[in-house]
Image (cartoon, helix red, strand yellow):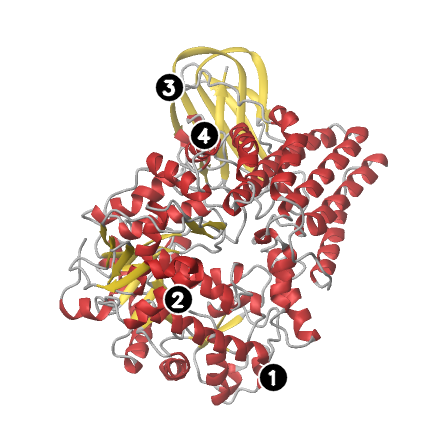
Amino acid sequence: MRIWAGASLLLLSVAAHADLAGEKATRGLIDRIIPKHSKQIVLESIPKDPKGDVFEVDSRDGKVVLRGNNGVSLASALNWYLKYTCNCQLSWGGDQLVLPATLPPPQKERRVGPYNFRYNFNYCTFNYSMSWWDWKRWEREIDFMALNGINMPLAITGQEAVWQRVYRKMGFTDAELSKFFCGPAYFAWFWMGNLDAWGGPLPQSWFDSHAKLQQQILKREREFGMTPVLPAFTGHVPPTFANKYPAAKTKKINWGLDFADTLVLDPTDPLFPKIGEAFLKEQEAMYGSDHYYSADTFNENRPPTTDPVYLGQVSKGIYDTMAKIDPKAVWVMQGWIFFNDQAYWKDPQIEALLTAVPQGRLIVLDLFSDVSPQWKRTKSYHGQPWIWCFLHNFGGRMNLFGSLENTAKAPTETRLDPTSGNLQGIGFTPEAIENNPVIYELMGENAWRSEPVDVQDWIKGYAHRRYGKVDPRTERAWELLAEKVYNDRSGADNAETSIVASRPTLSASGHWVGTSRNYDPKDMLEIWRLMVEAAPSFKGVDTFEYDLVDITRQALADIANAKQQEFMDYVEDKDLPKIKLARKDFLGLIADWDKVMGTRKEFLLGKWIADARKWGTNTSEKNLMEQNARDLLTLWGGRDSGLTEYSTRLWSGLLNGYYAMRWGMFFDRLESDLAAGKPVDAARFAKEVRDREWEWVNKIGSYPSKTSGNSIDEATKAYKKYSPSAAALFPTPPPLGLEQGAKATSSSVQAGHGPEAVIDGSVTLGSAWWGSPYPQWVQLELKQVETIKVVHIWPYWGGGRYYQYTVQVSEDGQTWKTVVDRSTNQKLARPKGDRVEIPATKAKFVRVNMLKNSANEGVHLVEIRLY
């Protein structure tokens, strides 16, 4: 671990010692989570270790003694004690805090954190998860952060109140600002300059209430010894700015996705530092300062030139604005830009942007380190400190997903890598939280471990802590979850969910709704069986019931995906009687699924809406909040938004109230057109469904905000109804064939997806060859001449697309014979692939010519099997 020297270390290190505020904050935490045992716990301050923050767990005179150098360290000591002495757990998915009357004495433990910074939050988290949080929910999250070692949270609640004051002082009227500030569900993208006004107008009550809420948040975070990261000015200005300041250098930018232009002030304009300074002064007056400032000028917005000189001027200007008001200022930059637009951000541009800021005064968040780390291609961010971040979730889409092995090892391996430069921390940067508790708990272990976690050993302890006792069925379920499910090696992001949540389609996936899995769905059926069989032993165990519902959701999602592909066959065959039976079956599944989800407070649309409406002070405001709440999870914008279903959730209320409505309409259209002997009128359906979606988003109506039914009962009913026939929906992938041991080559490789993927044995979308632009080819050279009778290929089936292609074979690589001709194909690609029997043909070379993709200019092939 490399440490900064001299003044930089003093400047950038977080609280160096525990004080009374830290002890008081931790005592309050104890009183909230285990109040009956509070008097048995002693808190003591100790100095910071030379290597970093430190905690100790000990006992004395029959009491548990927790020591730390600040509130976060003390809270982390408490969490360590609860987990590893008491076998307890706190999580987003329930708590298991069964403790004896007298707390057991711990073995003495001393832990020194190997990272200066443990960062938390993505801008998007503040809406996909936190849009409607009140102080009670925030208090719980701050406790959870402290327990898990977080000492550097992004803190952007209430930023709109600062901007309102600044722009009012600049002469902008409230009428002008009403066309600037967005609705409360969209602030993450407003703050990043992606949109204006959508979901508004924002009532004054929101400005006032969230300024107060931010003050509460910051007060508590600081009491724990955390260092909140507050925002700085990035150039986003009101739409009428150019009218008031016609000489200012402004630029209209468009995020796309059916949103209007926004206006950005160029960082080199003289007004930029003046506004930036005014903002920081106003913010400090309202919220104080901890000297760390988040600013992302080019988030999903390409600069006007590739000139490194310009980029250096921009970077210097932004930092100088901070430093003029706060000489201790440190700029915290999301490194998403370097991942998201790699075609623009080459080394000259990256170096110019980063090195214009004094060393140690800029921290880069390597935002997607868990899947696509950028530090290796950015020269470890040119000497500036940076943080390894765990992104994991996009939009809040629901899927059991992740890699426990990578989460356990990658942060430590990166820290010990001699080329990793000035790595100074780890961070959590998911777009949404409150999902997959296991992988977030494991990520949190890295805060206090210098060596990688042994996942096999850790997962056994996790099952015990999670449920409070050892049971061979739950232990086996978690072994399978770790081995089969939380073992993704595809490098894919977590974009997968269920076809049920997609705008109805005959494709295997929707625009933002992926359905690929990195596991065999039959393994999920076995996990489901184990949990259902164990359920009678865990009645009333909150954490178990959460997991049982979540695993049931995953199994039903897999079943629904397969059933949709089954009735796609009926549509291709124009088999109307079977389509009618499929309708009853599919909509019945959604209704049963809704009942299961309705047993947990975490999975209620009604609660999301009720929490939103609470922020309104009159009927009009409450209705605005509800419209925001409905829209974010469904259309994410207007009727024709390009982000439809990006933030979809598999919640009670959405399942039976929104998704079932759309699928019912879809079956109506299928049955009507096929009965009339006509092709399915997709264009007509698209208009009809968009009209109904927009009507639903703007409707006011109640969904249950309280749970109903029993989790174990409803999950067991679903298991008994659907599991007996489910295995038949998931046929075993065909065996490996003559392609084994072949050499794969291609005419093009895109984004690192090489041709070896087509013979790696995986038929999941995360493992595929990509080439661009079409036409491109991928070729296999077999070990010897073989007689081929069957060609089975899997074109990429995500996103509702078809491919046109041919398959050619050759004995010598010179003379080719076409054995499969799909050059005029317009059938959608399917998960089952395209299996073609051909006359027995001798060949050593097999070439798949990918001629066209109906969706974009790239071509993508998942797998090739030869028999």
Q: Which mark is residue 741?
A: 3
| Residue where numbered disc 1 is placed | 175
Residue depicted at x 44% and y 25%: 761
Position of residue 167 relative to residue 839, above or below, is below
Q: Which quadrant of the figure has residue 806?
A: top right
Q: Nearer the viewer, residue 694 or 69?
A: 69
C-alpha gap between disc 1 and disc 3 = 69 Å
Give the image location of residue 298, x and y in percent. Answer: 41, 65
C-alpha gap between disc 4 and disc 2 = 37 Å
* SS category of the residue bearing label 4: helix
| Residue where numbered disc 2 is placed | 28
C-alpha gap between disc 2 and disc 1 = 44 Å
Q: Nearer the viewer, mark 1 or mark 3?
A: 1
Q: Nearer the viewer, residue 770 or 81?
A: 81
Mark closer to the chain start, 3 or 2: 2
C-alpha gap between disc 3 and disc 2 = 62 Å
